[in-house]
Amino acid sequence: MNDLTQPFKRLPVALIGTGSYVPEHRLTNADLEKMVDTSNEWIVERTGIKERRIAAPDEKPSDMATNAARKAMEAAGVTPEEIDLIIVGTVTPDTFTPSTACYVQANLGAVNAAAFDISAACSSFLYALKIAVQFIGCGQAKTALIISSEKLSHIVNWEDRATCVLFGDGAGAAVLRTGTGKEGDSAILASDIGSDGTLTDLLLVPGGGSAIPTTEANIHEKLYTLAMRGNEVFRHAVEHMKNSALSLISRTGIKPEDISLVIPHQANLRIINAVTSRIGIPPEKVFVNLQKYGNTSGAACAIALDEAVRSGRAKKGDLILMVTFGAGLTWSSAAIRL
Ligand code: COA
């Protein structure tokens, strides 16, 4: 989906603050060696992951989202009352209804905000960004909070070595606001989202919804946990992330050498290396933190963005390319001037 061919003039949109939160508890590869038939060597070699964070039993996705949001709002210098839109991307909502975004709104006291959730799996943060850009660009919102928060530990099958080593918990957030449109000021330059619903069966939680409601039998079969065909997901991830990034680069006229930093979805180091080498970005321009957190779904690129900003890897004026991929299948990318 192309937002550069819009038939009417839009307001510019700036990114004015980021925040993130990860739970305290670290689950290391050594811990996993005691739980399933795996090894630190296998996990590091095949994925790059060394440890992941696991939320406390009573720690909800809305709690993690609220923590990340508070940091983003502090960085942006905005009050809760100024927020007029809250979008939360999650596949592990606190409750099926109401939305996790409504819990976050209450926690923050963001009394003037409309709040809703979206479901785009690991692509949700950039889907939320795209939606918020439409609201702000059309003058329907001024200050938006976009968040992705996941408690994937809740839907992981801890007896399945092929999936349980991959995922972790956490939340990332950003504040978007009507921009100045001035050269050099922060701007969301372009974004791309896409999906392929013919491949829903590659990565899904089959049970617990209306199609296969929870029963005693399917709890036993663990139908409420993530099921994945890893090899195929890997192949599609590389292809779609590469295509989404390249389409954004060609539509915006950005040259790969203009990009200061690529912040990709943090699922697997081999996926990241395959994608970035195919789009002509050298490793030193790629932000990777999956060794610390594993794959936190939509939160992964949001946490990485915040860490890149706070560590100084991404600075004001830098051109950032973000690109993600997830269940659905879904994919998304964004070019952001910080
Ligand atoms: N420890 C040790 N061995 C493991 C293992 C683990 N944690 N998980 C799988 N294996 C084994 C398999 O059983 C298989 O053994 P076999 O050859 O005896 O059957 C062998 O390792 C190779 O499995 P395979 O699935 O082909 O490995 P792979 O190189 O494709 O790596 C993934 C597996 C899951 C790491 C990889 O496919 C992947 O990252 N896919 C994308 C997943 C992803 O990113 N999902 C989220 C998208 S948002």
Image: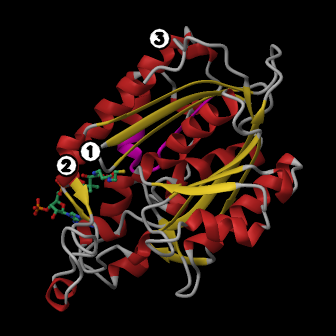
Q: Quick check: is the Cβ at mark 1 less than 8 Å away from ligand 1?
A: yes
Marked residue nearer the N-terminal end (2 or 3)? 2
Marked residue nearer the N-terminal end (3 or 1)? 1
Q: Is residue 301 visible to us here?
A: yes
The residue carrying pointer 3 sits among few (fewer than 14), some (14 to 19) or many (20 or more) residues within 10 Å by Cα, namely few
Q: Quick check: is the Cβ at mark 3 less than 8 Å away from ligand 1?
A: no
Q: CA distance from mark 3 to mark 1?
A: 24 Å
The residue carrying pointer 2 sits among few (fewer than 14), some (14 to 19) or many (20 or more) residues within 10 Å by Cα, namely few
Q: Is residue 217 above or below residue 321?
A: below
Left or right side of 338 for 3? left
The residue carrying pointer 1 sits among few (fewer than 14), some (14 to 19) or many (20 or more) residues within 10 Å by Cα, namely some
Residue 273: which quarter of the image?
top left
Residue ID at (49%, 32%)? 333
Instruction: Give the camera-side residue of 220 and 283.
Output: 220
Q: What residue is disc 2 on? A: 231
Q: Quick check: is the Cβ at mark 2 less than 8 Å away from ligand 1?
A: yes
Which tag is nearer the camera, tag 2 or tag 3?
3
Mark 3: amino acid: Ser
Residue ID at (42%, 18%)? 247
Q: Is residue 96 above or below residue 271?
A: below
Q: CA distance from mark 1 to mark 2?
A: 5 Å
Q: CA distance from mark 2 to mark 3?
A: 29 Å
Residue 117 in the image: state x and y as whole percent: 52, 57
Badges 1 and 2: C-beta atoms under 8 Å apart?
yes
Q: Is residue 159 above or below residue 117?
A: below
Q: What residue is disc 3 on? A: 250
Mark 1: amino acid: Phe
The mark total stands at: 3
Instruction: Give the camera-side residue of 51 and 322.
Output: 322
Q: Which mark is residue 234?
A: 1
Magenta-highlighted residues: 261-272
Residue 242: which quarter of the image?
top left
